[in-house]
Amino acid sequence: MTAPVLELRNVVKTYSVKQGLMGRPKPLTAVKDVSLSLGRSEVLGLVGESGCGKSTLAKILLGLEAPTSGEVLVDGEALGAQDRLKLARRIQPIFQDPYSSLNPRKSIADIISLPLRVHGIGDAASQKQAVREILDVVGLPSRVMNTYPSQMSGGQRQRVAIARALIMKPEIVICDEPTSALDVSVQSQILNLLGELRREFGLTYLFISHNLAVVEHLATRVAVMYLGRIVEEAETGELFDNPRHPYSRALLKSVLTPEPGLGVPDTQLGMAYPNPINPPSGCAFHPRCPLATELCKTRAPRPVAQDGGLVECHLYDPETEMFEQA
Amino acid sequence: MSDAMTDPLLAEIVGPTPGQMLRRRIFGHQGLLIGGTVVALLVLVAIFAPLLAPHDPYAQSLVARMKPPVFLGGTWEHPLGTDHLGRDYLSRLIYGARVSLLIGLVTAVISGLIGSVMGVCAGYFGGRVDAVVTFLINVRLAMPVVLVALAVVAILGGSLTVMISVLGLLLWDRFAVVLRASTRQVREREYVAAAQAIGASTPRILLAEIMPNIVNNLIVVVTLEMAHAILLEAALSFLGLGVQPPTPSWGLMVSEGKNMMLFEPWLVMIPGAVLFVLVLGINLMGDGLRDVAAPENRS
């Protein structure tokens, strides 16, 4: 891997949540001490259940939320120290819901040219030309410039959102579940478009999703997130062929098959997702883990290097006695 | 990307331009047309009052007191008759439009500015700002408008300026409540996050991204509050604590006519009817503007 363009170092994000009218605010740790790095033109897939902190991580990377502690480095520079506008030129988002990410009162040309206008790039004529070019890149005819989002389909809207993200030629694009709001047939078009754009412009993606098939298709590396922690990180092929963490295994098992008779797969996860305000002791996954032991209830595991990836589980830690049993 | 160009989903997006669609919606909306016409006519009457009024609204004449209007057997000298001091009723009605519209408009602008700034800030920033604004709204809602206005007028004396300032400083609550709620709703939309990620400044996000999406609510409240202010002025003038005589105000005309109501009911009915038509026109116009400007209609 080349020098990372984007790096997270021990990032923690804590919210305080008030329960009830008179309740004292309690801390909710959405992201717990996460370190990640993205190499140039890499696609890092970030997967995990709803509420595990994926979107919080995306907001931190976009500078929309400040981390409680830890730092985000872009090309080795700390994110906080960078000018807000400078950061926006390098990192742009593509959001989940194209029905909510485009302002319904603005024409398509206005929406796509907003970054240029905010940053004062070019005059009106050259901005118009840039919009026309980027529309061509994302596969929309230039006549949509004067239409409004409500006149477009979901797929077309998502193309507009991609055009807006790319018009300033950013290096890193944070895709926060960019296809989950779309029809299956349109999903593949958008995914192929994202793949082509990456090759064409050398983009780096952080691809957040809970759709494993999509991640397998697009990502070069995958990080699995559980309750604010990265529990496993590996090359895509490695993770899908040989998942190590019990949670990764359960996630892969949970993928629905097209076979109608098979029903919902049994992930052996048992209970529901724990309340992040009262996270379980020790390893946060232990109440649902089929392989949990007494040790898991008391001691939090540490990340262990495994075949070019990382896994955070006592099963793979040579210093715990479970290692021998595994 | 050749495959996208042949994509059937992208096939034909040709339609009227936004301007054409807007014009089509405006001229297809009867309520808006009727309300707009009524309001526009009354505004024109107010502006050109000196040209339209047949007599001086202040000129009294003891020999021509209580002349009935034409339709009750009067003469064309005084088409709507004269009041108990012999002043021409039509002229007073025409000049009275100035008072009503001025009060409605200026009050709506003052209270609209106060309420919108408070509501939008509370909705967008949340937290402490929201807590303070919510507290102020509650304080304001706990004060009965008419009683406060009566007290202030009793202390400072009634005049147009006092009337407008008092109503402007009292009627912002609905603006704040409505805009706070709609801003909260809009700020959760992802295009706000997208604008933040682009690096747009907070004023730009508030004015260019959020405002266009809540302005239809603002328009409705503006018209409601305009009508509200006009009616309050009439009510306070009727009670004798609003605009002071001899200013021609519709509320005052009703008040002055009420003593003769049993014998000359038109003295009360004519200004009452005009007041009713103006308020109805403003409300119809507000409803229509909301329908025309609503984003969900943009298809």
Image (tube, coloured by chain):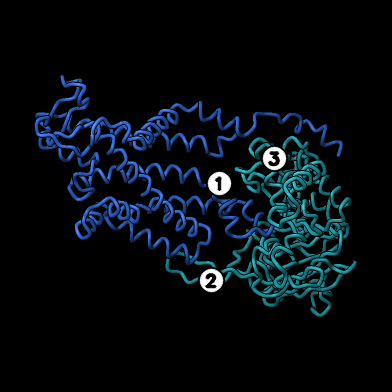
Q: Tag on residue B255?
A: none
- Residue at 76% x, 75% y is A302
In the rendered view, does A317 fall on the left or right side of A280? Answer: right
Q: Nearer the viewer, residue B59 or B66?
A: B59
- How far apart are labels 1 and 2 at the CA level? 37 Å
Q: Nearer the viewer, residue A83 or A74?
A: A83
Upstream in the sequence, badge 2 or badge 3? 2
Residue A169, image quadrant: bottom right
Q: Is residue A189 visible?
A: no
Q: Amino acid at mark 2?
A: Lys
- How far apart are labels 2 and 3 at the CA level? 39 Å
CA neighbours of label 2 inside 10 A, class few (<14), some (14 to 19), many (20+): some
In percent of width and height, residue B25 lies at 53, 29
- Residue at 83% x, 52% y is A218
Q: Secondary structure at mark 2?
A: strand
According to the rendering, which colour does chain A have? cyan
Q: Secondary structure at mark 3?
A: helix
Quickly name the residue at label 1: B212
Q: Chain of mark 1?
A: B
CA neighbours of label 3 inside 10 A, class few (<14), some (14 to 19), many (20+): many
Residue A22, image quadrant: bottom left
Quickly name the residue at label 2: A26
Q: Amino acid at mark 3?
A: Gly
- How far apart are labels 3 and 1 at the CA level? 22 Å
The quarter in which the N terminus of chain A is drawn is bottom right
Quickly name the residue at label 3: A154
Q: Which chain is blue?
A: B
